[in-house]
Amino acid sequence: MGVNKFADLTRHEFKDMMKLSRQQKPKIYGSIREFEDEKDVPAEVDWSKKGAVTEVKDQGQCGSCWSFSATGTIEGANFIKTGYLISLSEQNLVDCDSDCYGCGGGYMIDALKYVQKNGIMAEDKYPYEAEDDKCRFNSSEVAVKISSFTQIISGDENDLQQKVALVGPVSVAIDASWNFQLYSSGVLDDDSCENSVESLDHGVLAVGYGTKNGLDYWIVKNSWGEDWGMKGYVWMSRNKNNQCGIATDAVKAVA
């Protein structure tokens, strides 16, 4: 832990800022394995080094983490399919996804359903404002549309590892604990956080994984700017009983 820009926030103020699905409980749907047999996966993967991840963004004082998590998996899926990395509009989701609540909270799977149906505009066509506004979606300026999405088997870190390694960045929900709030560097190993569905309060993006000094970790992109964590990223403990619920409710866009 360290002193960062969130160090002066109380836990109530911090939780109020995140607002993952504040008005509704996270939705757990049935899921099937995408791969019939266990496949060998690389010992380490980092999609941010392969061009599949946009720059770290900053949600500001808006409970829109869900939209950043959702655009991240869509951006990755689109890059892997087309070879083009397009920064997508979180504001498009904040303003227009009627199944979510804008800065008041939302959930990633609902955002993916919206994009599957309507498509999504690029960030440069619909810039982020960090506040709720009227919907200005223009169907003639859709940048990306997804064909479907697939969910990780709830609580199964092996399944999450396969999806990240073989399919691309995955949208994940976590319990963002006090230690997460004050994270600065290294592997975050936090036994105080929970992994139940009810404890999930923040949406982020799993872009890879690795091992350092015998500690397995997930490479996670946050949406709090580059002045948080390791230039906007956090290494979260992997294979530690689904610590902080990283595999409890995770979903991957399919371009």
Image (cartoon, rainbow, N blue to C red):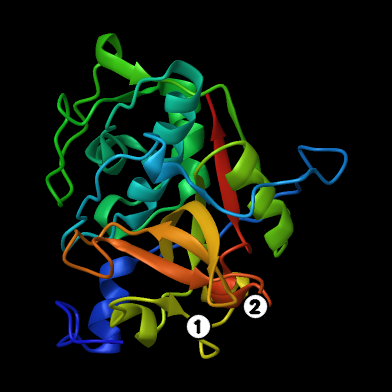
Which image quadrant for residue 242? bottom right
Residue at image x 41%, y 22%? 118
Considering depth in this image, is 112 or 99 the residue closer to the camera? 112
**What SS does tag 2 mark?**
loop
Q: How many marks?
A: 2
Determine crowd level at label 2: few under 14, some 14-19, many 20+ residues with C-alpha closer than 10 A: some
Residue at image x 39%, y 22%? 119
Q: Amino acid at mark 1?
A: Asp
**Left or right relative to 149: residue 107:** left
Q: Amino acid at mark 2?
A: Lys
Which image quadrant for residue 194? bottom right
Residue 207 % position (x, y) = 46, 49
**What SS does tag 1 mark?**
loop
Residue 6 % position (x, y) = 19, 79
Residue lying at the far front of the rendered structure: 213
Residue 160 can be seen, yes or no? yes
Residue lying at the far right of the rendered structure: 37
**Is disc 1 in contact with disc 2, using a CB cutoff of under 8 Å?**
yes
**Left or right relative to 146: residue 10:** left
Residue 152 % position (x, y) = 67, 50
Determine crowd level at label 1: few under 14, some 14-19, many 20+ residues with C-alpha closer than 10 A: some
Viewport quadrant of the N terminus: bottom left
Residue 240, numbered circle: 2
